Image: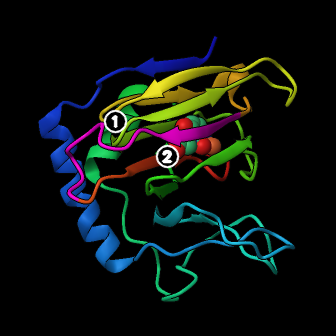
Amino acid sequence: MSLDHFAQRLDDNAQRTLLAELRDAVAQAPFYTPTMPRTGKPMSVKMTNCGSLGWLTDKEKGYRYEPVHPVTGKPWPPIPALLLRLWDELSGYPAPPEACLVNYYAKGTKLGLHRDEDEQTFDAPVLSVSLGDTALFRIGGLKRRDPTRRIELKSGDVFLMGGEDRLTYHGIDRIVPGSSSLLPKGGRINLTLRRVTPA
Ligand code: MD6
Ligand code: FE
């Protein structure tokens, strides 16, 4: 009941504004390739973050939040204003997000079924924004073996996962190449806004 798909919440103009804000952020905090806990296997998504805390993973220390970029050692850049506004409008949460994970999916990138469970609090929702090529998003239930369904996340779509559904299993089956002209080189950017600590 607390899964919401706001199709085309950002119009073309808003998507371009956000992309411009993101370019500044990525200039300060470049995309890098994260590695899986224990195995050190590289993930296929490229990642970076904005906000006071960023989500990361590596072989040695696994999944966690850190205040600095793992390659540059510098603090993450601020969360784009457009995203902070969107959080105010849609989250129903009385404090701003602390983390904005930025994922880049080139053609052929997938993301396995997972829950967002590395936060210290689950009382705030996770708000996700999609830019660029359409993603085939898979969403299940609160148990890994629950039945799943597919939702198409298109450029400008916003997805909100909160309340009793905050810990729903989800993943990305694949990206549909050539489905958007927003990103000059194609592919998809997904931004997820989160609260990490209790307000
Ligand atoms: C993606 N999204 O759309 C991956 N997580 O590329 C997520 O993993 C996600 O869309 C939590 C809440 C909403 C999401
Ligand atoms: Fe997720």
- Residue identifier under label 2: 193
Q: Position of residue 184 (x, y in %)?
A: 20, 57
The reply to whether residue 125 is in sight is yes
Q: Position of residue 116 (x, y in %)?
A: 70, 44
As for residue 181 lying within the magenta part, the answer is yes
Q: Position of residue 130 (x, y in %)?
A: 39, 40
Viewer-proximal residue, 159 or 185? 185
Inspect the image, locate mark 2, and give the three-letter code of the amino acid beneath it: Leu
Can you say whether 164 is above or below 153 in the image?
Answer: above
- Residue identifier under label 1: 86
User: Which residue appears at 30% of the width and 36% of the height?
Assistant: 179
Count of all numbered marks drawn on residues in the image: 2
Left or right of 4 in this view: 84 = left
Disc 1 to disc 2: CB gap under 8 Å: yes
Left or right of 76 in this view: 157 = left
Looking at the image, the residue that sits furthest to the bottom is 72
User: Which residue appears at 16% of the width and 49% of the height?
Assistant: 17
Inspect the image, locate mark 1, and give the three-letter code of the amino acid beneath it: Leu
Looking at the image, the residue that sits furthest to the left is 13
Residue range highlighted in magenta: 170-184
User: Which residue appears at 53% of the width and 87% of the height?
Assistant: 71
Viewer-proximal residue, 75 or 95? 75
For label 1, being within 8 Å of ligand 1 is answered: no
User: Which residue appears at 44% of the width and 72% of the height?
Assistant: 31
